[in-house]
Image (tube, grey):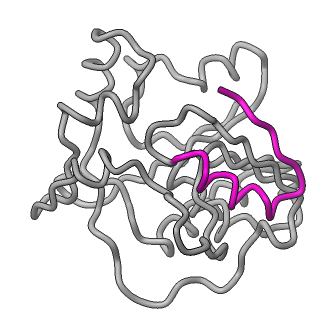
Amino acid sequence: AYEIRPRDWSSDVCSSDLLQARGIPFALVDRGVGTPRQVSSDPWIDRERVQAAVRAVDGPVVLVGHSQGGIGITYGGIAPNVKRLVYLTAHAPGIDMPEGVVLRSPALVAGGIDTPEGRLFDPATVGAVFYGDCTPEDVAWAVARLDPQQLPVQGPLPEERAWQVVPSTYVVCTEDGALLAAGQRVYASHMSEVVEWP
């Protein structure tokens, strides 16, 4: 397996362990930026990191983006060896939302606090939004690992959108508490294939 892991994930059990156990090669693209660390909101950085990961692979690639990870695979996913995009309850830039479609949970938006370190999420509300079906212990474990979200970066966006030219699957998670199903289904309607999970 090949990995891009600048952050120490050694104590975390994550999907990469399941992939590795099945002998499936993978790369994790770290979206961290700055000091103190924030999660990138810069589509150009996300694009370059995805493209670097794709260039490192000698063979076919499936790109999976969750939440804002959909931005990176949208802008960085056009390459001859990228065979499919998978949006797992993820944003797909370039798709207009009809007026009145609720996209994000009101609790998530209301629970965001903008600080010099980035956007922080209120632990009192983010547990229910991000980890609604988890035990209190698992919620505490996950919330302790949340990094601030970089404040939105202003400027032009990359023009290419991989979902327009690469076969794509959108996984609608109907009970997702952050990116609501109504918004997910608008994104999904533009994809090659749609799967719905609770």
Residue at the image position 78 percent from the left and 69 percent from the top = 78
Q: Nearer the viewer, residue 18 or 183?
A: 183
Asked where in the image residue 75 lies, by quadrant, the reply is: bottom right
Q: What residue is shown at x 65% (from left), y 26% (from top)?
A: 198
Q: Image quadrant of residue 27? A: top right
x and y percentages locating residue 99 in the rendered image: 55, 74
Question: Is residue 25 found left or right of 76 in the rendered image?
Answer: right
Q: Is residue 43 above or below residue 131?
A: below
Identify which residue, 111 or 26, lies in the foreground: 111
Furthest-left residue in this view? 116
Q: Residue at x 37, y 35 (%)?
A: 129
Left or right placement of residue 69 versus residue 114 in this view: right
- The x and y percentages for residue 119 are 22, 57
- Residue 123 covered by magenta stretch: no
Q: Which residues are magenta?
A: 180-198
Asked if residue 192 is positioned above or below residue 153 in the image, the reply reads above
Is residue 16 shown left or right of residue 103?
right
